[in-house]
Image (cartoon, rainbow, N blue to C red):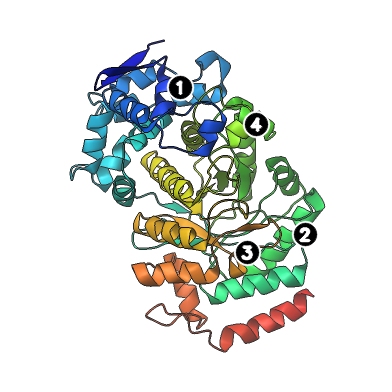
Amino acid sequence: MSSFSHTVGSKTYQFRDLKDLMAKATPARSGDHLAGLAAASAEERVAAQMALAELPLTLFLNELVIPYEHDEVTRLIIDDHDQAAFARIAHLTVGDFRNWLLGDTADEAALAAVAPGVTPEMAAAVSKIMRIQDLILVAKKCRVVTRFRNTIGLEGRMATRLQPNHPTDDATGIAASVLDGLLYGSGDAVIGINPATDNVPQVIKIVTMLDEIIARYGIPTQSCVLTHVTNTIAAIERGAPVDLVFQSIAGTEAANASFGIHLALLDEARQAALSLGRGTVGDNVMYFETGQGSALSANAHHGVDQQTCETRAYAVARKFQPLLVNSVVGFIGPEYLYDGKQIIRAGLEDHFCAKLLGLPMGCDVCYTNHAEADQDDMDMLLTLLGAAGCTFVMGIPGSDDIMLNYQTTSFHDALYARRVLGLGTAPEFDAWLKAMRIFTADQRATLGDAMPAAFQRALAGLT
């Protein structure tokens, strides 16, 4: 294992190995300080970033931050690496890679072509030497399109997950939130519920209810109950109308084991969902959530900084061709991302790295109530992500998840971002909104009479 050094002025900083260098080069965040991995000063961080910029990209294929024989995620990264795709950038250093990404030759087609050759550690490394504007510019150029009942990720569009959580899983409460979201044009990414009671019968009950709503009104979207993957497999085996399979994932085998998952189980779940054939325009059936700090919180990070661990989770996601992936960026708490500044940076890093690796990446623009953050910080992150071409964001009544007890983005917030940035919904969903007189031809919400009357009848039938 190589060691590294860099001299700033009269002082030489030593870094014992690649993961130490990567950790010290990371912009400051509380989780790395908690783990004892962070740079001791801003000068040491700059020294690490300069040393990192000089490393050839080929080094990341030989110097592994977690040993191959100890971790199935590492084995996935190495075994699935596309050497032909990598050939175009194989001669570059990390610093050269940054310059290439920012240049005009790295257009949409070029970025798509090299994506299979970029490892998570390469993406994490280059992100550590990029400014906020760099992360936005490059992510904006990446185009990742996925399909199930509609088309997600097209240029000039930003989808939303309609998140109608309820603290008792009350059917009327869920349906009312679904109605509220649809009237704001929310729900093209997915209508996705975190169940308050997490067991197979309850999963079947909720997913059946959502299927009835989607089918009754011909809504070109997909549903998902965000339960453990084994519950979803069991629901499929019992004949439930499952659209998407959800699972939280992490960037190390040990962290995934703490979630009760492994790669073979995710493949089993994907095959089960594919066997149902419920997609109408595509067959991307997986929905993954991630978040910086998950491996550290499980003591499963192997001394790797939290942002690099997070990026390794994207290799897991990429393996299973998901419809949606998102970082729940501020949910894990201030022990890992202390304040609004750290959350904003992390959200843009996560989006950039995932898009660079070829993932349909969204972001839950969120924070917990004990973090040093507020809704102004979230407005800034939402706007920046919209400018960066974020695939989707969350939509929840009033920004306040009364079941999970955290602050995220509202239906109104998503409508704001679309209006100010000139973004539309998924094309099939947009056509439905107009046909139902929710949107007019210029995509402005009208809250017309036709949809509320129809949903009043639906609500009466559900209760």
Badge nearest the viewer, 3 or 1: 3
Badge 2, how many Cα within 10 Å: few under 14, some, many 20+? some
**Residue under label 2:** 205
* Residue at image point 44% right, 22% down: 19
Are discs 2 and 4 less than 8 Å apart at CB? no
Q: Earlier in the sequence, mark 3 or mark 4?
A: 4
- Res 128 quadrant in image: top left
Residue 395 position in % (x across, y down): 55, 64
* Residue at image point 59% right, 51% down: 277
Badge 3, how many Cα within 10 Å: few under 14, some, many 20+? some
Q: Amino acid at mark 2?
A: Lys
Q: Earlier in the sequence, mark 2 or mark 4?
A: 2
Residue 292 visible from this viewpoint: yes
Badge 4, how many Cα within 10 Å: few under 14, some, many 20+? some
Badge nearest the viewer, 2 or 4: 4
Q: Nearer the viewer, residue 184 or 383?
A: 383
The answer for how far apart the CA atoms under marks 3 and 4 are is 27 Å
Q: Which mark is residue 298?
A: 4
Are discs 3 and 4 less than 8 Å apart at CB? no
- Res 85 quadrant in image: top left
In the rendered image of this protein, does residue 431 appear above or below residue 258? below
What secondary structure is marked by label 3? Answer: strand
User: Count of labels shown?
Assistant: 4
Q: Which mark is residue 400?
A: 3
Are discs 3 and 1 less than 8 Å apart at CB? no
Badge nearest the viewer, 4 or 1: 4
Residue 462 position in % (x across, y down): 76, 74
The answer for how far apart the CA atoms under marks 4 and 1 are is 26 Å
Question: Which quadrant does the C terminus fall into?
Answer: bottom right
